[in-house]
Amino acid sequence: MNFAPYSIETARQRAVDALRNPPPLARLVRPVPKGGLVARFVAPLDLLKRQNWSRHRQTGELSRVKKELAYHMRCQNPGLRSPLPGRPFVRCIRFSSVEPDVSADTFKMCIDLLCMPNLKAPMRLNFLRDDRPRDAEIHQTWEPAPQGGGFGLIEVFTGDPFADIKEKRRRIRAPKIKNAPGTVAAVPGAKTRNRPERTAKGVHGGS
């Protein structure tokens, strides 16, 4: 089957068509979104580089790919003025004819672009405070696509907007361990050494 050259419009339509049906392979599990859809991006496969590719490229070539990907995503959505509250949900699906390795992490640069901008990365889109697990729930998966018709899909959902409040409440409600006066809290797994008790005259047992 011949496919038209990649374009944002055709990739978006292919994504919508693919999401209407379950994954074509029984072993594949498509992450179920949490919250409402905030933004949807598509990207060509040649910008979704594996991490081993990034580690073995010169700074200039890697910088070129990052800038091209940033412009490609920004033209689809300019980003937010402030990051989404709580713990947003991000779903990344790679549609390609070849399944990548588990550690390929091909959406790494896309996820970085969803985070807050800084001096080194002013082109970021400010959807996420950070990509740490406590700040965002992120999933990267793969689904088969005919050769020549591949692309990447990146979706941002509101997730749990009250995750911060829930975390604070859990910390407040957590029981505090009170220690006896003059003792130190025991650390699980730490080795302790028994010491003789001291009395007013010195070490217990002394005269």
Image (tube, grey):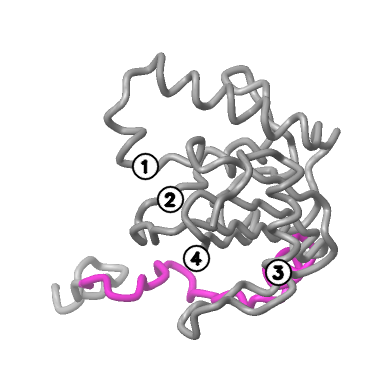
Instruction: Give me the disc on residue 105.
Output: 2
Residue 89: image quadrant is bottom right
Q: Could you tell which of marks 4 and 1 lies nearer the N-terminus?
A: 1
Marks 3,4: beta carbons within 8 A: no
Q: Badge 3 is on which residue?
A: 19
- Highlighted range, magenta: 164-192
Residue at 36% over, 70% down:
187
Q: Nearer the viewer, residue 193 or 129?
A: 129
Q: Earlier in the sequence, mark 4 or mark 2?
A: 2
The percent position of residue 16, horizontal first and vertical second, equals 75, 62
Quadrant in the rendering for residue 191? bottom left
Label 3 and label 2: CA atoms lie apart by 22 Å
Q: Which secondary structure class fits the magenta region best? A: loop
* Mark in the foreground, 1 or 3: 3
Q: Residue at x 50, y 77 (%)?
A: 28
Do residues under tags 3 and 2 come within 8 Å of each other at their CB atoms?
Answer: no
The span from disc 1 to disc 3 (Cα, nearest Å) is 27 Å
Look at mark 1 in the image and give the residue it sits on. Answer: 51
Q: Residues within 10 Å of mark 4 (few under 14, many from 20)?
A: some
Residue linked to disc 4: 144
